[in-house]
Image: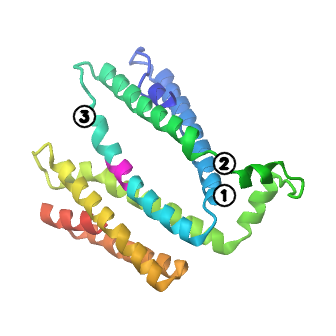
């Protein structure tokens, strides 16, 4: 519902943009707040539900598969939902449809995917575990340098992958100056195809090496090298190849 608020700003006097700006800031704050709450709690639950290394690697493969599809659909689907001539109404309907999709999958997740097993339930009610204050726990995490380095690198990876997807529209329109309205979809298709092909390759390599840290470091350097290629592309073919490798 907070997503709908972002695209439902009231029609006010254009000479005074402050109310609309405040509406945008508040709606973005609410959206990020609820999105963060969902992300944090699903991440916590993931560590409890998948306890063995085999389960977590299998989960990582499925998560990467659906995550890449979701990111690409997040770029491709909204423009296809702009039905009406009135831009304001079109964006409101688009946001409502996206919100409805999120609600449906959210209900599916709560009903089945997020259901705790008996081990988690018994541990929650057990008196053997000492409850830890949130701020104290946060401080303990911050003091772990290895975890902070991993966390920072992961955040940078998410930022880089999000920027790579979001900039496709800019590159195809202003750099390549393409007049084809489907150009962005083609580049995103190459990105998705490369990502889906790479998932089983990385999982097989991880199973062979059996060292999460080494594979993560190798993958990080490969990602940096591929992103550097974006500086030197000249034609649409170059960009297709780079998006496939990314």
Question: Is label 1 in contact with label 2 (beta carbons under 8 Å)?
Answer: yes
Q: Which residue is painted at 47% across and 85% down in the image?
A: 209
Quadrant in which residue 68 is drawn:
bottom left
CA gap, disc 1 and disc 2: 9 Å
Say which of 85 and 214 sits in front.
214
How many residues crowd around disc 2 within 10 Å: few (fewer than 14), some, or many (20 or more)?
few
Pointer 3 or 1: first along the chain: 1
Residue that badge 1 annotates: 48
Residue 88 pos. (x, y %): 33, 21
Q: Is residue 69 magenta?
A: yes
Pointer 3 or 2: first along the chain: 3
Pointer 1 or 2: first along the chain: 1
Q: Is residue 137 magenta?
A: no
- Badge 1 marks a residue whose secondary structure is helix
Q: Which residue is painted at 28% across and 23% down in the image?
A: 87
Label placed on residue 116: 2
Q: Which residue is painted at 68% across and 73% down in the image?
A: 145
Label placed on residue 214: none
Label placed on residue 80: 3
CA gap, disc 3 and disc 1: 38 Å
Rendered position, 192 above or below 108: below
Residue 180 pos. (x, y %): 10, 45
Rendered position, 34 above or below 95: below
């Amino acid at each position: 519902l907070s997503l709908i608020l972002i695209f439902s700003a009231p029609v006010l006097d254009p000479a005074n943009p402050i109310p609309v700006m405040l509406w945008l800031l508040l709606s973005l704050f609410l959206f990020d707040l609820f999105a963060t709450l969902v992300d944090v709690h699903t991440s916590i639950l993931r560590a409890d539900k998948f306890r063995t290394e085999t389960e977590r690697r299998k989960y990582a493969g499925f998560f990467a598969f659906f995550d890449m599809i979701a990111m690409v659909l997040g770029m491709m689907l909204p423009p296809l939902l702009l039905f009406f001539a009135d831009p304001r109404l079109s964006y409101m309907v688009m946001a409502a449809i996206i919100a409805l999709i999120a609600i449906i999958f959210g209900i599916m997740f709560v009903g089945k995917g997020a259901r705790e097993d008996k081990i988690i339930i018994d541990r929650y009610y057990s008196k053997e575990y000492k409850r830890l204050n949130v701020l104290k726990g946060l401080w303990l995490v911050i003091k772990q340098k290895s975890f902070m380095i991993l966390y920072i690198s992961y955040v940078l990876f998410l930022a880089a992958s999000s920027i790579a997807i979001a900039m496709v529209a800019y590159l195809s329109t202003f750099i390549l100056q393409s007049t084809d309205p489907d150009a962005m979809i083609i580049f995103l298709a190459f990105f998705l195809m490369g990502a889906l092909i790479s998932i089983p390759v990385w999982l097989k390599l991880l199973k062979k090496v059996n060292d999460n840290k080494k594979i993560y470091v190798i993958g990080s350097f490969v990602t940096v090298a591929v992103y550097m290629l974006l500086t030197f592309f000249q034609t649409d073919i170059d960009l297709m190849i780079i998006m496939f490798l990314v």
